[in-house]
Amino acid sequence: MRRLAILSTHPIQYNAPLFRMLNEDQGVELQVFFSKTWNQVKFDPDFQREVVWDIPVSEGYPHATYDASSKAGKTSLVAAIRDFNPDTLLVYGWNFPGHLAMMRHFHGSIPIWFRGDSHLLDPLPLWKKALRRLWLTWVYRHIDFAFTVGSANEAYFEWCGLKPHQMARAPHAVDNDFFEKEDNSRREEARRWRSELGIEPTDHAVLFAGKLEPKKQPGFLLQAWHDLGDSKSHILIVGSGPEEQDLQRKWADVPGVHFLGFQNQQKMPTVYRMVDVFCLPSTGPGETWGLAINEALASGTPCIVSDRAGCAQDMGQLSQHVHVASPKDRHQWTQILSGIFNGAPRASIEIPRPFSHDAMMAQIHRQFNHE
């Protein structure tokens, strides 16, 4: 049995299914170390609210929490990892308190594996890009191997100096089974919810779901939808954030616009089934992947995604129902929306199963066997 230590910031809904799978694996002894306390993460400044997920994110795997932002916390974290005596330390992201320190401390004594989803899609001035490359090349000298999430992420790691033998592809994934299950009952719930909102069965609908912040561009999508001039179409805005009040002042009285506020995970499979298309128009910086695209596809919903999102190239190749567009070209988004509304009926669309956590599990075992 191989002993695997994982360093992450806090319980995250996207990682929890993988951690549970690893804990159930007979060939792995797992211990997860969190570098932030609950008090440090319970308030989400982008959602502008405390976020408590209504699905289990810290159950089913062993874990311990430390405050790695303090010297005493880092010391305790080092001691705890050392006491666990892992064969490998898998670090999720370096730019968090304590993470780079752990990479530096243990590098050379145990293999350091890394999981991050950065890319080079956001434009930077040449001088800033050169400084970034110099710094990141030094940072990644402290890892031995990286599990990449996609092609844009691989290009980033190559740019930072990693060699092909130091990388393996394990695409970003969500709990597909959670979004796929109970399809009939969720579609019935979606029909009832649409009816309550005054959306007729034959009406088309667009979805934005995420933080209402400038880089996500909810206002851009609202305008692109409005440019359709289609009185029988609707747009659902799900989420909260710093732009929420301004958007509501401008759009709440426009026919067809529905602000549904923050919706927790249990509701999202139904929300995705209420619409013809989910849209992620982010302009960046920082849209490292866009896991909502995975969720929408697993729910059977086509998508339009910004070419600044890390998932765009890979998801665009995965399915004919993922359309990639520029986050600066509003007319392009309007045209794609029009094409989807006037295309094949929703019921005839079959969405391929998106990426799964099985890929990461397989790569972890492959790397253990390689060492």
Image (cartoon, rainbow, N blue to C red):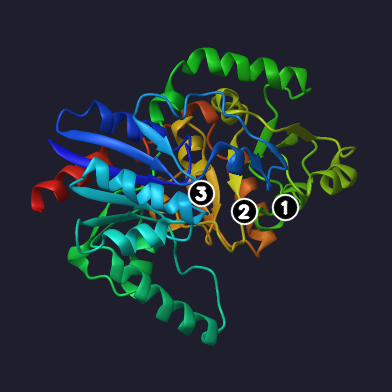
- Image quadrant occupied by the N terminus: top left
Q: Residue at x 75, y 48 (%)?
A: 222
Q: Residues within 10 Å of mark 3 (few under 14, many from 20)?
A: many
Q: Nearer the viewer, residue 78 or 37?
A: 78
- Image quadrant occupied by the C terminus: bottom left
Q: Position of residue 262 (x, y in %)?
A: 69, 33
| Whole-number angstrom distance, CA of label 3 to CA of label 2 | 10 Å
Observer-side mark, 3 or 2, equals: 3
Q: Is residue 86 left or right of residue 9?
A: left
Q: Residues within 10 Å of mark 1 (few under 14, many from 20)?
A: many
Observer-side mark, 1 or 3, equals: 3
Residue ranking furthest to the bottom: 127
Per the image, label 2 sits on a secondary structure element best described as loop
Q: Nearer the viewer, residue 1 or 46?
A: 1
Q: Amino acid at mark 1?
A: Ala
Residue 77 visible to the viewer: yes
| Whole-number angstrom distance, CA of label 2 to CA of label 1 | 10 Å
Q: Position of residue 37 (x, y in %)?
A: 53, 40
Residue 357 visible to the viewer: no
Per the image, label 3 sits on a secondary structure element best described as loop
Say the numbered circle drawn on residue 245.
none
Q: Is residue 200 above or below residue 223?
A: above
Do labels 2 and 1 touch, CB within 8 Å? yes
Q: Nearer the viewer, residue 292 or 6?
A: 6
Q: Earlier in the sequence, mark 3 or mark 2?
A: 2
Q: Is residue 330 left or right of residue 148?
A: right
| Residue wearing tag 3 | 290
| Whole-number angstrom distance, CA of label 1 to CA of label 3 | 20 Å
| Residue wearing tag 1 | 224
| Residue wearing tag 2 | 281
Q: Amino acid at mark 3?
A: Gly
